[in-house]
Amino acid sequence: MIPRYSRPAMTAIWDPANRFSLWFQIEAHACDALAELGVIPAQAARTIWEKGNKPYTPERIARIDAIETETKHDVIAFLTELAEHVGPDSRFTHQGMTSSDVLDTCLGAQLAQAADVLLADLDALLAALERRAFETKDVVCMGRSHGIHAEPVTIGLKFASFHAEFQRNRVRLVNARQEVATCAISGAVGTFAHVDPFVEEWVAQKMGLTPEPISTQVIPRDRHAAYFATLGVIASSVERVAIEIRHLQRTEVREVEEYFSPGQKGSSAMPHKRNPVLTENLTGLARIVRGMVTPALENVALWHERDISHSSVERMIGPDATITLDFALSRLTGVIDKLVIYPDAIARNLNQLGGLVFSQRVLLALTQAGVSREDSYRLVQRNAMAVWERGANFLDMLQADKEVTDRLTPDHIASLFDLGYHTKNVDTLFKRVFGRA
């Protein structure tokens, strides 16, 4: 992923230094387990730790890369460079193992590390959403369906809805992390023919992973598919929030706005512009993350006990999906934290259609007064269309309609135009989402 959309904590996970460090830990822990079993000398296992456990500096990484240009095999290049440090005892590394044991266990560890960063991102976003929800709990605004005015809601309910969704996403990511954080040290075709299952259990425990119940030389890729699908769902939730902000920032609406910092410029041509550039960026980043879900799904079906058609895919989507989503979640948190709310514009839009937002309540009142639903709908819609077409006042129209006033008094009709009626259950909804109101 390009530096523009990268943050240090996540990029460090995919840096060669971290990858080779994890490879070393897998190999060294396996040697400890083999020493416990008496397969290799205990002193050899200690030597491997003492001489091999050195930082993977740019020089060491360059040496591994140079060896790989000849071997055309990354794990062999790694083991060859390790042997240059360890000496004769290096012959005990990789006993009974295959490359996938190292690569897949490492990938599981990296994806778990990435999930931990993303979970921290989600926690920060959830905190921002909760704070803004309570700040705006009682700010009544226009609810829309199909982009058209529907009935009143509150800005706080919008934030609460987003919070509930990202809370679900957090649960999904916890489950995805648990599912992908597995370890396989089972050797060629996964039969443990040359390595005792104890080694896998030992390495898994040391690496904070779970032994893979049955591998085929590779860890089954349905686990990874579920992980990346979860990232795709989270990205879609990011876009849902971004789209809402973009719509509400349109000039004709202008109920909320991204924070426009001092010195910021909106357009190279039009000095008046204040564009929703951050949320537009989030929409684009969400597309990138979702675009990596299908390749992860296609990685599930491999030939027989293994092939490497998944490998090139994962070298790209592993870093790019997690780095992109990490950046997007952090950016969204900043947008929510500084989002500007415009109460006057909210009130203006709420009253824009002359009271049409109360149409359903009038409809229900007529049915409760004995009018059939069909006739009630006809009466209310007839007056509502006049408001749409001629800009009349809905309350005045209803109070002048004899068919309506035959069933409802003018005072009764006026009492139906009450915003509080639509917000009376906001506390109940907040308790459902936050456990408090």
Image: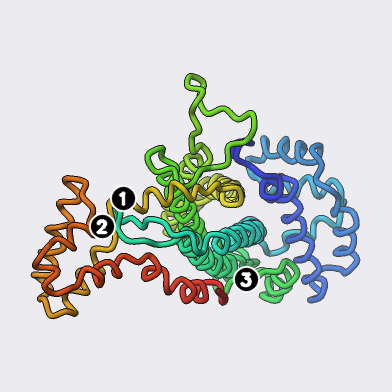
Task: From the viewer's side, name the closer residue of 143 and 90.
Answer: 143
- The circle on residue 193 is 3
- The circle on residue 356 is 2
Task: Mark yes or no: residue 372 visible.
Answer: yes
Distance between mark 2 and mark 3 Cα atoms: 75 Å
Classify residue 16 by image quadrant: top right
Secondary structure of the residue carrying numbered label 2? helix
- Marks 1 and 2: which is nearer the front? 2
Which residue type does callout 1 highlight?
Gly
> Which of the marked residues, 2 or 3, is nearer the chain's N terminus?
3
Q: Kindly identify which residue carries mark 1.
A: 147
Residue at image coords 69%, 74%: 201
> How busy is the neighbourhood of tag 1: few (under 14 within 10 Å), some, or many (20 plus)?
few
Classify residue 120 by image quadrant: bottom right
Residue at image coords 55%, 44%: 316
Question: Is 267 drawn above or below residue 72 in the view shown?
Answer: above
Which residue type does callout 3 highlight?
Ala
Secondary structure of the residue carrying numbered label 3? loop
Secondary structure of the residue carrying numbered label 1? loop
Distance between mark 1 and mark 2 Cα atoms: 15 Å
324 vs 251, left or right, is right
> Which of the marked residues, 1 or 2, is nearer the chain's N terminus?
1
Task: Mark yes or no: residue 305 visible.
Answer: no
Q: Can you give x and y, in whole percent of width and height, for residue 180 in the image?
A: 57, 65
Question: Is 376 drawn above or below residue 80 in the view shown?
Answer: below
